[in-house]
């Protein structure tokens, strides 16, 4: 039996693939790629911070996350390479923000589902 969009629904195995939740191979690939990048605890922490502010500098992230700048930079690079983050440079500072509205929506959903202090 195929996966249903609603847990109470059942989709016949012969259902039209275009009617499934993620309809195309491209959609599945993009979702998998983003979720894999977001799956690391430190990257998820960075995204939680960035989801709560418009943007922040690398140095601010270092202080908020509590790890080295080189470690933060490596994780930021992964998130940027997966098109999750956008950045801008101002003089000698680099500022990051979540550059995909879909990721912001996902972060809000995850906050609602998993953050005990939010409930």
Image (cartoon, grey):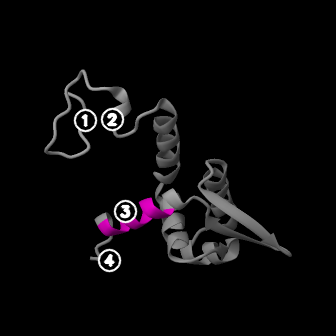
The residue sitting at the top extreme is 14
Taking the image as shown, residue 70 lies to the left or right of residue 1, namely right
Taking the image as shown, residue 69 lies to the left or right of residue 35, namely right
How many marks are shown on the rendered structure? 4
Instruction: Kindly identify which residue carries mark 2.
Output: 20
Whether 60 is drawn above or below 6: the answer is below
Depth-wise, is mark 2 or mark 4 nearer the camera? 2
Q: Which mark is residue 118?
A: 4
Instruction: Kindly identify which residue carries mark 3.
Output: 110
Q: How far across and down, in percent of the image, does residue 29 sit?
A: 50, 36
Q: Earlier in the sequence, mark 1 or mark 4?
A: 1
Q: CA distance from mark 1 to mark 2?
A: 8 Å
Give the residue drawn at x 28%, y 73%: 116
Q: CA distance from mark 1 to mark 3?
A: 21 Å
Q: Which mark is residue 3?
A: 1
Mark 1 vs 3: CB contact within 8 A: no
Taking the image as shown, residue 98 lies to the left or right of residue 109, namely right
What element does badge 4 sit on? loop
């Amino acid at each position: 039996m195929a996966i249903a969009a609603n847990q109470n629904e059942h989709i016949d195995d012969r259902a039209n693939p275009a009617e499934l939740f993620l309809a195309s191979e491209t959609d599945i690939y993009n979702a998998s790629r983003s979720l894999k990048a977001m799956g690391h605890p430190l990257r998820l922490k960075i995204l939680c911070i960035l989801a709560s502010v418009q943007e922040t500098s690398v140095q601010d992230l270092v202080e908020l996350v509590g790890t080295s700048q080189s470690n933060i930079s490596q994780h930021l690079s992964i998130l940027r390479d997966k098109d999750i983050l956008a950045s801008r440079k101002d003089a000698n500072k680099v500022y990051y923000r979540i550059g995909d509205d879909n990721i912001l929506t996902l972060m809000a959903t995850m906050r609602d589902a998993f953050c005990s202090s939010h409930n």
